Amino acid sequence: MSQRRIIDSQEYLRRLRDAAEAIGRRVSFMEVCGTHTVNAFRCGLHSLMPSNVRLLSGPGCPVCVTSQGDIDMMIELARRGDVTICTYGDMLRVTGSGGNLEEARGQGAEVRVVYSSLEAVRLAAAEPDRKVVFTGVGFETTTPPTAAAVLEAEARNLKNFSVLVSHKRIMPAMRALLDSGQVRVDGFLCPGHVSAIIGYAAFAPVVRRYDLPCVIAGFEDLQIAAGLARLAEMVRDRRPTLENLYPQAVTRWGNRRAQNLIRRVFRSADATWRGLGAIPGSGLSLRGRFARFDAQQVFGLSAPNSPEPPGCRCGEVITGRVEPSECKLFGTACTPVRPMGPCMVSSEGTCQAWFKYHRPQGSLPAVTGVEVRA
Amino acid sequence: MSSQSLQSAAVARLDALRHIVLAHGGGGQLTDELIGRMVLPRLGNDVLNDLLDASCVDLATSRAALTIDGYVVQPLTFPGGDIGRLAISGTVNDLAVSGAEPVAIALGLILAEGLDRKVLEKVLDSIAATAREAGVRVVTGDTKVVGRGQADGMYITTAGVGAVPAGRRLHMDQIRPGDAVLISGPIADHGLTVMLARQMPDVQSVLRSDVAPLNGMIRRMLDRTGGVVFMRDPTRGGLASVAADIAQRTGLHVLLDEPRIPIRPETRHAAEMLGLDPLEVANEGKVLVVVRPDAAEAALAALREDPLGREAMIIGRIEDVRDGLCELQTVIGGRRILQKPYGEQLPRIC
């Protein structure tokens, strides 16, 4: 671990403290990326924050915002004897109204964890007697691979491959969050991965229309600290702008090839978000030409209007309205071993990160450092 | 044709079998052939060669340590090792971290019908080489064959007996505030290597499993210093699991210093790619040592003399706070709780 990194992070934290002191009131910044959520906790950033600065986790974890109805459709499909579900691992334990994919697998359903959408296409080609359904979940980062899978299935003329699409777009959600008036934030730590695809210019309207600073940051402790320092300084100076602190990966207009891939295969559609409800234009559906790869059409499914688990406050957690510990289920009925809500299932969910890494401030033993020579 | 030549013709036919068949576990000629031609040439010794139902070993001590472990890793072979090396190392290390000197190993093989003979030979070679490396003998064993498609090709169970020198007692109840926590080298290599091999076989990676028998390194350290109070090999659940367990069971506070915890850059990258915390990932060739503060430097020096411990570090200490928690002091000076991981590690989706 380089000494340089430690010195730099101390410098960013000092700037954050200075700016926070000058602001003199409580400020909240929101990140909208699960990786930011987890890494901020992993590096102990919350224990170093000035007392008047809060870092909220917004709707940035794709598992956490997937609606109960979408999850129920996945489970319903998995329970059909002729279907093999291919899913990214995080979806396994998300519980719908009746069980989750892991339980369905235990009862004999064919559920496979894949690391790439093309694995699902290969599986469909190798097992023509099975109907292979890929669960397309995630934001702009995971959408291009799903598009590529659909194009590959078309090129191979596969009749037994389809996608259950619950992909979402981050910008409409951020706008809905701000328009709802239920969330008060003073700035956004914008997601590095999503920005690499959509380009940082996409966040300009947030600055323009809502007068809020936006900083695109990478995922290391140092980069997150730098992002927060800049946000606080912009609030202090009352000069909200859009800054890209992750130029290694993020350009103004993003990855055009990936964007074209998305546009070629998907069109925008309304989508239901857990905690946010239906947001016009915030989702994606397959274009008509690819209808035969749309699992909802192939199997005649429609997302049931499934109620969320009683008492679960994941929706308020991902909109930054409550902290996980304010939920009655948190840490008692709902733990990573037996999750009730999606924020506890996903390794990038706010509740799991809280449960694993967080402890209330003030109860820490004095920081003495580990004095050893080595 | 004489009955003798009939028999040798049968053996020749059996010899020509390229795959394991159910009859290899039937207790008849084919079983004999498997033991006689494949196992004994590799693992044989004056005790095993007698093929008795139970073997006797001399312990030269009044206290024996006994351990058993099952190995079901997939794939059977991975960069840096295979299921055979894993089975010997795992059992040897369980004995060694208990303060015992490994003496003898019992080997149970469960083979699936259809297993390629070459794969079995390779695993047996690896068992032999690792046992030699650890200076321990396989003294008894058992072989079963199950139907095609069962047992993922091969499962191995190894039980081990070790001799505990008189007066040596390593136990968590010996841990006191102020004790230092050491790790013998970079963490998380095994778990990530296997996970990459299993989930992303197409990915070219420089990662290698750390699987190795540690009894030689541990013996040197124990000979050199009397201050070691507790050891454990952080296998499943990783360093986080062992450290959290120590905190929980002693009721003391374990503080680890993140910048001192050795992790190879390539391992860190693989963990990031799979969305895993290296602290929670399995090791198969590392030992965590709790040692009295005045003996920490001597223990560290002894570990570093061994090729397997060259990158050993003092990574933390036991604090005099009775909260039963383990905490990590992070690179940027923050603090966070370390807990035992929960069950299966789920890879992230973006």
Image: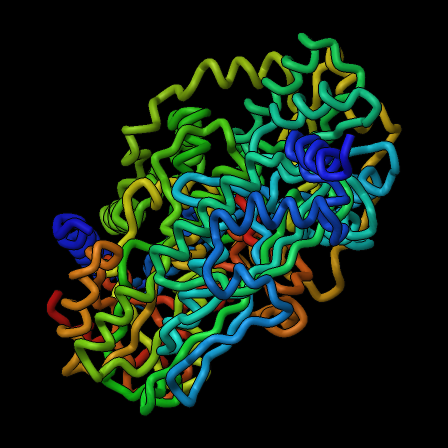
Which residue is nearer to you in this view: B66 or A10? B66
Residue B205, image x, y percentages:
38, 33
Figure coloring: rainbow
Name the side, left or right, on which B92 lies relative to A288. left
Name the side, left or right, on which A262 lies relative to B306. right
The part of the image, by quadrant, that contains residue A24 is bottom left
Which residue is nearer to you in this view: A22 or B27? B27
Q: Residue at x 76, y 40 (%)?
A: B148
**Total labels drawn:** 0
Q: Which residue is drawn at 38% across and 86% down?
A: B61
Whether residue A38 is visible = yes
- Image: A186 above or below B293: above
Name the side, left or right, on which B257 lies relative to B94. left
Which residue is nearer to you in this view: B308 or A374? B308
Residue A331, image x, y percentages:
59, 71
Q: Residue at x 63, y 20 (%)?
A: A149
